[in-house]
Amino acid sequence: MASKDRIAEPWGSRTPYGPGEEWPTRVDSHLAEGVEPDQVDRWVRSATILHSNGDALDIAVRDGRIVGVRGREADRVNHGRLGPKDLYGWQANHSPDRLTRPLVRRDGELVETDWDTAMDLVVRRSRELLDEQGASALGFYTSGQLFLEEYYTLAAIGHGAIGTNHMDGNTRLCTATAAAALKESFGCDGQPGSYTDVDHADVIALYGHNMAETQSVLWTRVLDRLAGPNPPKLLCVDPRPTPVAREATLHLAPLPGTNVALMNGLLHEIIRRDMVDHDYVDAHTVGYDELVELVAEYTPERVADVCGVPAERIREAAELLGGAERLLSTVLQGFYQSHQATAASVQVNNIHLIRGMIGGPGAGVLQMNGQPTAENTRECGADGDLTGFRNWSNDAHVADLAAVWNLDPMRIPHYTPPTHAMQIMRYAEKGSIRFLWISATNPAVSLPELARIRALLAQEGLFLVVQDIFMTETAELADVVLPAATWGEKTGTFTNTDRTVHLSEKAVDPPGEARPDLDIFLDYARRMDFRDRDGRPFPQWHDPESAFEAWKRASAGQLCDYTGMTYDKLRGGSGVQWPCNADNPDGTERLYADGRFWASPDRCESYGRDLVTGAPLEPAEYKAMNPDGRAIIKAAEYLPPHEEPSEEYPFALITGRTLYHFHTRTKTGRAPQLQKAAPEVWVELSPDDAREAGVSEGDHVEVASPRGVIRARARINAIRSGVLFVPFHYGYWDGLTDEEVGRRDRAANEVTVTDWDPVSKQPLFKTSAARLRLVGPGGGAPAPAPTTTASRPVGAGTTETVGGPDAASEEHVTGGAR
Amino acid sequence: MRIGVALRELYDSESALAGELLRLADRHAEEQEIHHVARDLVRWSREHVREIVGAGSRYGLDLGEPNLENPEPPTEEAGELPGDDSDPELLLLADLRRLYRMAAGVSLDWDLLGQGAQAVADADLLALTKRCHPQSLRQMKWADAMLKTVSPQILTS
């Protein structure tokens, strides 16, 4: 047992291993100061909630309070390890400023009330609008952080009982493109690969994916492979000097917004050199000829001009990918939140399809998620998707869902694509959505162009319900605030990026009158008196386990089949990958191993979209293109970004995460070790750009775009010249002094542009044009940015980021197999 | 031979479509997807016009570069749904309907030209129609898709 400061050493100690070997176990834990392991009353089963990795852990409970966490050694995902956010983030549950009573707006002020009063208001307004305008007046905007049972219930209420098309999750900002890219290539959402592909791969390509900071335990697995015999080669595509870039065999830093050009260049070279598995392409795909034709003109030289990457590096990258025997690719926000998001991500799938590398050990694609339960938002249909990966433009699928719910199919809206988050906001802005229920997310900080978002959420004519655990920037604008329970205070399941399902059990009671989100949704349904076709109360379930059993029926026979799981089974082992059914009682490690896809016209979740216009394909078009349900190779031309740097705004601004925080810091900002590691917003710029602007490390600068202005301290790092980076975590719930109230110049989204990918509808946070100017000297103090991460400064002399005694965590390298 | 007539017709209809896309982007700048995608799709029409000018010279036509930055407004009336022009929602529906019809017209014109190209065995001209025609269809389908997407909310509120 060793003590580690996991703020200073985010990935902990190395346990090297070789290709094909089992990743050794290492159990990480952190307990509150003064608590010894033998003083813990109970360990309660759960998994991590502050990223998408789905690391299994047990919650330590003492005297009815959470006192720490410990990674679960037996779990397939983490083999006992935890990341910094997991080790310290649980402390936010105890924050004294948790919401504990419902609030309603009276005479302009939010005042405490009881549940009956708050829910009656919500129900009355719902009924008024349903009578007056119908279901199109009501919208729901949820999260990637609730549990499966809660999303399924919300989807049933929204799409089934109310019949509104206006339901989405903040997964639109994080994972919509992953889902879209999978649908385009494979006909259905569903992660093809597995985390165990890291154990086998000889080349790992990370596209716009700073894995070290977004999925730190998965990165630990990669680091352990790199430290072992016969390590994999790494390709990193990222304009920032991330920890991934530092470890990479080859690092390409394309100009923001040029990903499709780069991918087409890589495909051009792989095809030109005929590093193509023609047998696989012939047997299992459609569309190869169109790809060959389209990428023909994307020579490395032409691509080099567009992307600002040397042609020779593009050739080397293609050689690396084309020479791989077991290629693992991962994709995240550098592609998903950038220009032509889906088109670029689909090209990553195409590399695997033309190389015949799908479904084998080490040969996989991981189109990543950003949030812990994003996968469930997608599969349950609490985003735009139809429950259970059903196809909203296939009437038979809609009828099937209506039968599962025992509702009239006409009640389920399917005449148009589901309304995505940005369009919901637009309808609210225009006044046709007049009731918006936001659960577990904070759009007043996380959506682009915040001045606009605040104004539309605050409109008189919009009845805003916010369900959360803290008084967020969004909750402050609400008409009704509903206090929710969170992780550790309620029971439910959730599914990570590689389809691993964990059960998270209630460890302690929620504070005050706060209630589980599931209870709140069901309470609403009962008060609205929703009924199914037989007059029974709808939804027909009443608690987490009955909701899970109902969900199993909705998933039966679908790709995301849960019918082989029960709560008891999930308590028995640790982590089961769907599909799990009678044929696969222990779950399924990889999809599509047999080259058979979920893409036949009567089965597919989506007929696909035009990668440039976003227009959905008609069923007949899809049938003509792909009658046998093969994988679809879809080519896409490069288009220049919609907002390019100009004379007035010479920088490309990208926003993103840092290792120590999650989303708008509602939890991580309340965990002292995490908050101290990255206490305040900063902006990253290159040494050349800093020199030109007369800016030194730590100086106060202003970043402006046509939308707004923020002020931050400058971090000079090895980011690509011409590019600025601002972390998006910082809003206004803390850090505003009295004289600053009303001055909103801290959130990155004050300056971002309103634009989205026409295919996935994911907002673009990586292609805003901006300018930077020096405001004043920093007095020699460095920027408040971590030194352990992508924001590591180029100059010496900056104090290293450490956690100190409070951050002491235990690390027990057992060394063996799990 | 009337290939020149077909080329001139296409030159006119494709230029008008480019102008219409720009006008749509401008008029509905607050509808961000319509604004941005319309501007992306102008590129195709501009490229088509350039190619038509090139092909025209082989058929003795001097078509010249059209002014695509400040296009003439279309002659067709805007309001075709009940209601008046001051209702921006109905205007959006009307504009998308017009765009759809204009793109459909361009698509038909490419069809015609393709038939002529085959009849006179002009392989280059046929290749041109095969490059451009699918993009006109995609423009048309986009207008249709946007109309289907935005109309339910407009019609029910």
Image: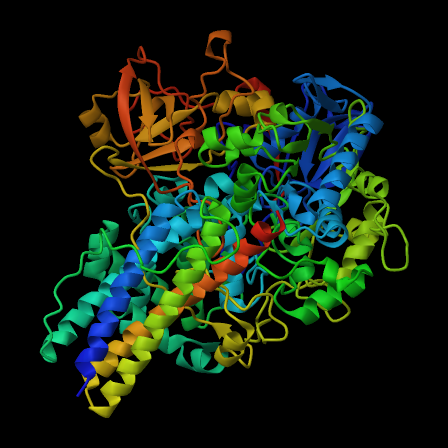
The correct choice, above or below, for A36 with respect to A633 in the image is: above
Find residue B132 and report its image quarter.
bottom left
- Horizontal side of residue A335 vs A294, given as left or right: right
Residue at (18% x, 66% y) in the render: B50
Residue at (23% x, 86% y) in the render: B117
Q: Residue furthest right?
A: A535
**Where does residue A352 sit, x and y in percent of width and height?**
44, 67
The correct choice, above or below, for A794 with respect to A555 in the image is: above
Residue B130 visible to the viewer: yes
**Where does residue A166 sit, x and y in percent of width and height?**
62, 48
Q: Give the camera-side residue of A523 and A722.
A: A523
**Where does residue A506 sit, x and y in percent of width and height?**
79, 36
- Horizontal side of residue A602 vs A348, given as left or right: right
Q: Give the camera-side residue of A787 and B12.
A: B12
Residue A660 visible to the viewer: no
Q: Give the camera-side residue of A371 and B31.
A: B31
The colour scheme applied to this rendered structure is rainbow
Q: Residue furthest top?
A: A739
Residue at (20% x, 59% y) in the render: A302
Find residue B14 and report its image quarter.
bottom left
The correct choice, above or below, for A393 with respect to A813 in the image is: below
**Where does residue A254 sit, x and y in percent of width and height?**
29, 48
The correct choice, above or below, for B80 with respect to A243 in the image is: below
- Horizontal side of residue B34 vs A190, given as left or right: left
